[in-house]
Image (cartoon, rainbow, N blue to C red):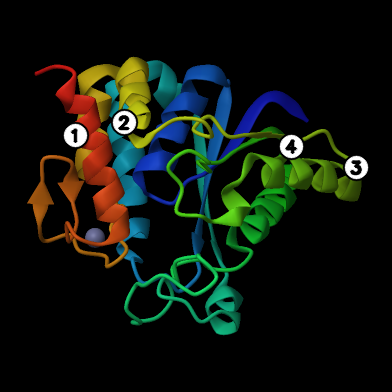
Amino acid sequence: MKDDGALVLFSGGQDSATCLAWALDRFGHVETLGFDYGQRHRVELDCREAFRTAITAMNPDWAARLGPDHTLRLDALAAISDTALTSDAAIRMGTDGLPNTFVPGRNLLFLTFAAALAYRRGLKHIVGGMCETDYSGYPDCRDDTIKALQVALNLGMERRFVLDTPLMWLTKGDTWRLAESLGGTPLVRAVVEHTHTCYLGDRSHRHPWGFGCGTCPACDLRAKGWQDFVAERL
Ligand code: ZN
């Protein structure tokens, strides 16, 4: 098992793209993993290769460290859940206080599949963009959930995986600042141009913070984070 090997859960969104840069800055060998689970904003998967290309072009060390990309189909997730992320339903708040974009157990499944792949690839670190600070109330993004899962995976697979969540305590503004500290303006530009956040999959409207409908909860969070990031330089 490579101690300096990492597998990054890379969806093509802002958070996971920043996690990829974070991992390339730290580990000697980094592979990426994306999931096709029938998500409505499937366009995010198309952003993945563009971002990987952009990030390797800006830093030769990162280019040398970036290994293969993997994608796994998880059709079962859409089949067993009825949410606004996997259907055309309108995004709204449920009576349980959770938005109906919550796909039950999504991150638990993602991390379990990631660990199975990391096991085969001999990678010790599994990096994910889960965040408790600005999160939309998803219980599987909580620090305690991730720590509990790390214990379960290590017991169940007889390995010493480390689940790294560098964004766990950052605000969305901090995530832009982290990208800038890792790769300067070129990385911030690559995140703006080549990552996708909008739940509706809109890539026809361009804002200072990137593409999106501009009104869904994901666009709203991304836009607010960007405003926080640029406000301090005005
Ligand atoms: Zn949107």
Q: Position of residue 215 (x, y in %)?
A: 19, 60
Disc 4 + disc 1, Cβ < 8 Å: no
Q: With respect to residue 143, does 109 lie above or below?
A: below
**Cα distance between the residues tagged 3 and 2:** 38 Å
Dot 2 falls on a residue whose secondary structure is helix
Residue designated by label 3: 158
Q: Is mark 1 within 8 Å of ligand 1?
A: no
Q: Residues within 10 Å of mark 1 (few under 14, many from 20)?
A: some
Q: Residue at x 53, y 29 (%)?
A: 166
Q: With respect to residue 120, does 4 lie above or below?
A: above
Disc 2 + disc 4, Cβ < 8 Å: no
**Cα distance between the residues tagged 1 and 2:** 8 Å
Q: Position of residue 73 (x, y in %)?
A: 55, 68
**Cα distance between the residues tagged 4 and 1:** 40 Å
Q: Residue at x 61, y 45 (%)?
A: 142
Discs 3/2, front: 2
Q: Residues within 10 Å of mark 4 (few under 14, many from 20)?
A: some
- The amino acid at mark 3 is Glu
Q: Residue at x 36, y 48 (%)?
A: 13
Mark sitting on residue 188: none
Mark sitting on residue 227: 1
- The amino acid at mark 1 is Gln
Dot 4 falls on a residue whose secondary structure is loop
Residue 70 as seen in the image, left or right of residue 146? left
Residue designated by label 2: 173
- Tell which circle, 3 or 2, labels the residue nearer the N-terminal end: 3
Disc 1 + disc 2, Cβ < 8 Å: yes
Q: Quadrant of the N terminus?
A: top right
Dot 1 falls on a residue whose secondary structure is helix
Dot 3 falls on a residue whose secondary structure is loop
Residue designated by label 4: 122
- The amino acid at mark 2 is Gly
